[in-house]
Amino acid sequence: MMIKFDVSNAGLQENILNYQDKVSTIHTSIHDKTCKGNDFLGWVNWPVDYDKQEFERIVKVANKVKDKAEVLLVCGIGGSYLGARAALEMIKGLYSNDKTEVIFVGNTFSSTYFMQVKEYIKNKSVVLNVISKSGTTTETALAFRMFKQFMEEKYSEEECVERIIVTTDKCRGTLKQLAVEKGYETFVIPDDIGGRYSVTTAVGLVPLAIAGVDIVKLMQGAKDAYNEFNTADLNTNVAYQYAVARRILENSGKTCEMFVSYELQLAMVAEWWKQLFGESEGKDGKGLLPCSATFSTDLHSLGQFVQDGNKILFETLLLVEKPQIDTLVPHDAENKDEMNYLAGKSLNWINQMAQLGTLEAHVKEGNVPNLILTIEDTSAYSFGYLTYFYFKACAMTCLMLDINPFNQPGVEVYKKNMFKLLGK
Ligand code: PA5
């Protein structure tokens, strides 16, 4: 099994298996497409049903533009942004000497950010991938207008056609129309897959392939997870165990789930997870507030609240068995820093001891329930597997609350106000 799930530090007040009947009913309703939000279930069979021809075209186009892409600008927001960034950081780590540097835009109105990116890339060789299912999201559409102009000033019309890639709806929307008119390469965001469930479609695959991630392995991970979690059996399906454990903890009075990892390269996976669970579950006055921390970094900030503050939260750890790279603490003859007691020990071992010590502190003295998920490594395969695990868990846990996991009516309210102020 690729993901291990441990509830022994959560003090669950109910047995997960008591929920078998409910889970079986919901599982059937997901798979026979009768659940709430059933027009957005394309992600369920996607790891086996995905368009193989389009996948080959992604690989081909990525190989073609890779050499040109000193900088890959990825323009998108929400589900059209977070997945690719989460994957990139998890798989490659935060610093790599790869030829292609990926910069994310279209996810903010910040003028300083826009101008600094523009200045930073002005003498670099740039490829631009705009990603928007609707084609009308204001942050993305504005940034695309401005970076498209930047490209048009920098390159000839023909060269722009080689360097601008559009990922959007198959036939609808202004972005699709523009792409067809200009002759840009286009990839499809399927109708029945919402943004936050789309990382294994062209939304994530195009930028990841250009950045050199092995997307064949990533899809293999998703496919293996699809097979693993294609059962209602709570004895074996850890995605559903996690879904149920969240509900049990909520029933015991918790209102907030903190995603905790001990690897900085998982911080964007936490951001992606926050969107998936927050946007799927937070509606009709229900849901757990998803928040996140990276330890031991945040033990020196949020750690105080977790240990000692208001008992509103439980933690869900995402642990990695094998770090990408490990190293030993060197011996120092002078030992003025008095750190020689750790000489010869691996940094990862020290990280693990920090984790064990914290677990005991938070659970035993802090009385904070901990759920523990463990994955083998941070490979492309594991990313594909992990994201499908979370999709399945998220759908189940939301449907247990009788919530549609696939819409986001709440995000329209600010837009209405903003458009009024902008004079749209
Ligand atoms: O999960 C979602 O559906 C949203 O977060 C969208 O991905 C986000 O609003 C961006 O939308 P679009 O791809 O239409 O620009």
Image (tube, rainbow, N blue to C red):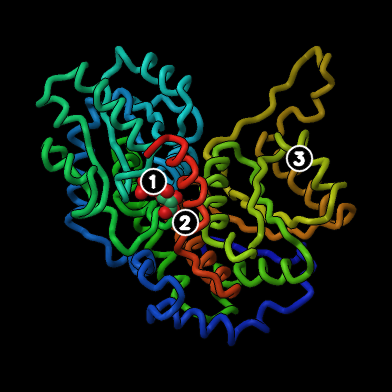
Can you give x and y, in whole percent of width and height, for residue 276 in the image? 51, 55
Are the two marked residues, 2 and 3, in contact with CB atoms closer than 8 angstroms? Answer: no
Disc 1 residue type?
Ser
Q: Is residue 280 left or right of residue 302?
A: left
Label 3 sits on residue: 302
Q: Is residue 146 above or below residue 300?
A: above
Q: Nearer the viewer, mark 2 or mark 3?
A: 3
Q: Which mark sits nearer the N-terminus, 2 or 1?
A: 1
Seen at 65% across and 48% down, the residue is 291
Disc 2 residue type?
Thr
Can you give x and y, in whole percent of width and height, for residue 299 in the image? 76, 38
Seen at 77% across and 30% down, the residue is 342
Quarter of the picture holding the C terminus: top left
Q: Is mark 1 within 8 Å of ligand 1?
A: yes
Of all residues, the one furthest to the bottom in this rendering is 21
Q: Is residue 240 left or right of residue 225?
A: right
Q: Is residue 292 left or right of residue 80?
A: right
Label 1 sits on residue: 80
Q: CA distance from mark 2 to mark 3?
A: 26 Å
Disc 3 residue type?
Leu
Q: Nearer the viewer, mark 3 or mark 1?
A: 1
Label 2 sits on residue: 387
